[in-house]
Image (spheres, rainbow, N blue to C red):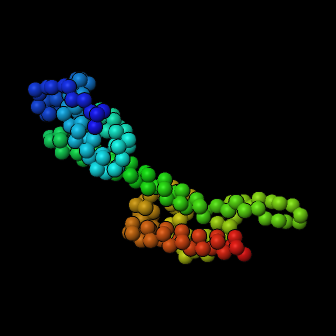
Amino acid sequence: MSFIKRNIVNDLSDQDLVTKYQEDGNIQSLCDLYQRYLELVYGVCLKYLNDEASSKDATMEVYEILANKLKSHSVDNFKGWLYSVVKNHCLQILRKQKHQIESLDSNEFMHSDELMHHDSEFELLSPHVDLHQCLEYLPSGQRESIQWFYFEKKSYEEIAKIMQVDREQVRSHIQNARRNLKNCLNKKRNG
């Protein structure tokens, strides 16, 4: 934690520094306040992200978030509020990473780049031809969930509201659809 340097001492309470920052935008008040809890912020980031470099980045990002949010939020207990902000930021980072990983995993079987021989010419099949054929074989709940999630970029919560089912049902539909699509695409590739 050598990147954390605690050299600012301010006798004002957390609430006084918050009020000062909110009233006149005094950035030094925010710096003093953040400096008090820098180790806490880094510790929470490290707990959730489990990576030093990502935690350092997130610690710096939290400062920027505070600079914006603290202007408009009423904060009675700064330390508790800060902890919630840091935790939510880390969870958002993890969700984003998970979504990127899921997208990468799904791309392995969602596209077909095979070359097919046709009348002595090689022709590249459209990457979505097999996929759209396989989508037709899915039960309607699975098909709709996949279309909303991958093509319309909707979240599980948004899909659940649209389809009027709970979030777990959407997750189940997508998981089952991915497995069924993978099996269907493999059958089409292997003939």
Residue 41, percent from left and from top: 25, 41
Looking at the image, which residue is at 59% across and 70% down? Answer: 182
Along the viewing direction, whichever of 19 and 64 lies nearer the viewer: 64
Along the line of sight, the residue nearer the viewer: 176 or 146 = 176
> Is 137 positioned to the left or the right of 96 in the image?
right
Q: How many marks?
A: 0
Hey, which residue is sitting farthest front in the picture? Answer: 2
Question: Quadrant location of residue 13?
Answer: top left
Taking the spot 64% from the left edge, 71% from the top edge, the residue there is 186
* Residue at (11, 27) in percent of width and height: 12
Name the residue located 39 percent from the left edge and 48 percent from the top edge. Answer: 93
Residue 155, above or below 169 = above
Inspect this view and state whether residue 71 appears: no
Q: Nearer the viewer, residue 71 or 51?
A: 51
Image: 61 above or below 20: below
On screen, residue 116 versus residue 43, left or right, reads right
Q: Looking at the figure, which quarter contains the N terminus?
A: top left
Please state the horizontal and vertical placement of residue 24, each as a whole percent of the image: 22, 23
**Residue 162 point in image, percent of width and height:** 45, 64
Q: Is residue 174 visible?
A: yes
- Residue 60: where, in percent of width, then height? 33, 35
Q: Is residue 43 above or below residue 191?
A: above
Q: Please state, as top left, top right, bottom left or bottom right, where the C terminus lies in the image.
A: bottom right
Q: Quadrant of residue 77?
A: top left
